[in-house]
């Protein structure tokens, strides 16, 4: 995947968000880590019925969905304030599906690409290789 210089790369799963900026202007990405973002998880995602009990294994999924919604909120805000002008999202497949439900129209227009892969916790070099080969 070709990545523009200055593009933001968001790497997410249901519990963690890592943001990077591409500093390279050639075909190979060179990512620099950006500061961590506080994610608001009070939005419980887009799911339907939410029943909560200690015996309900769906509770952790609700938390992951809420994290994805909070992540989309952060990305939307950065796109709308102009601090992100091109974006690549790399996320675990289920998280990516939840993120898409919360994309603002403006985010969708600057989205360079999406990669359905869980790369949180991987090195920057691993992320760069996956983007380059996508």
Image (tube, helix red, strand yellow):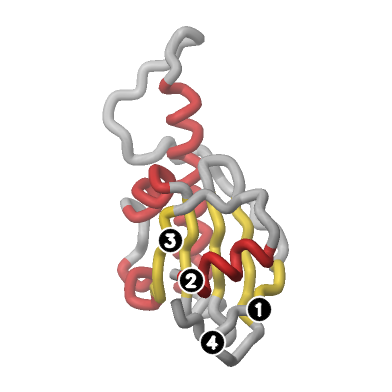
Q: Residue furthest bottom?
A: 25
Residue holding disc 2: 133
Q: Earlier in the sequence, mark 1 or mark 3?
A: 1
Q: Nearer the viewer, mark 3 or mark 4?
A: 4
As drawn, 56 above or below 121: above
As drawn, 110 above or below 95: below
Residue holding disc 4: 27
Q: Secondary structure at mark 3?
A: strand
Percent across and percent down for residue 90 are 49, 59
Question: Which quadrant is home to the N terminus?
Answer: bottom left
Residue 95 or residue 68, whichever sits in front: 95
| Distance from Cα at disc 3 to Cα at disc 4 | 17 Å
Residue holding disc 3: 115
Q: Earlier in the sequence, mark 2 or mark 4?
A: 4
Residue drawn where x is 40% and y is 47% of the image = 93
Residue drawn where x is 58% and y is 69% of the image = 129
**Which quadrant of the figure has residue 107?**
bottom left
Q: Secondary structure at mark 1?
A: loop
Q: Earlier in the sequence, mark 2 or mark 1?
A: 1
Residue drawn where x is 61% and y is 50% of the image = 120
As drawn, 33 above or below 82: above
Q: Earlier in the sequence, mark 3 or mark 4?
A: 4
Tag of residue 80: none
| Distance from Cα at disc 2 to Cα at disc 1 | 14 Å
Percent across and percent down for residue 7 are 54, 79
Percent across and percent down for residue 105 are 31, 68
Q: Would you call the spot at circle 2 few (<14 residues within 10 Å), some (14-19), or many (20 or more)?
A: few
């Amino acid at each position: 995947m070709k990545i523009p210089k200055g593009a933001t790369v968001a790497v997410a799963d249901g519990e963690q968000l890592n943001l990077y900026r591409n500093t390279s202007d050639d075909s190979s990405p060179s990512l620099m880590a950006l500061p961590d973002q506080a994610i608001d998880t009070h939005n419980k995602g887009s799911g339907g019925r939410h029943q909560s009990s200690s015996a309900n294994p769906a509770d952790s999924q609700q938390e992951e969905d809420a994290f994805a919604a909070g992540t989309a909120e952060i990305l939307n805000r950065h796109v709308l304030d102009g601090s992100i002008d091109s974006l690549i999202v790399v996320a675990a497949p289920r998280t990516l599906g939840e993120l898409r439900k919360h994309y603002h129209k403006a985010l969708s227009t600057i989205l360079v690409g999406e990669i359905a892969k869980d790369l949180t916790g991987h090195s920057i070099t691993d992320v760069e290789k996956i983007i380059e080969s996508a």
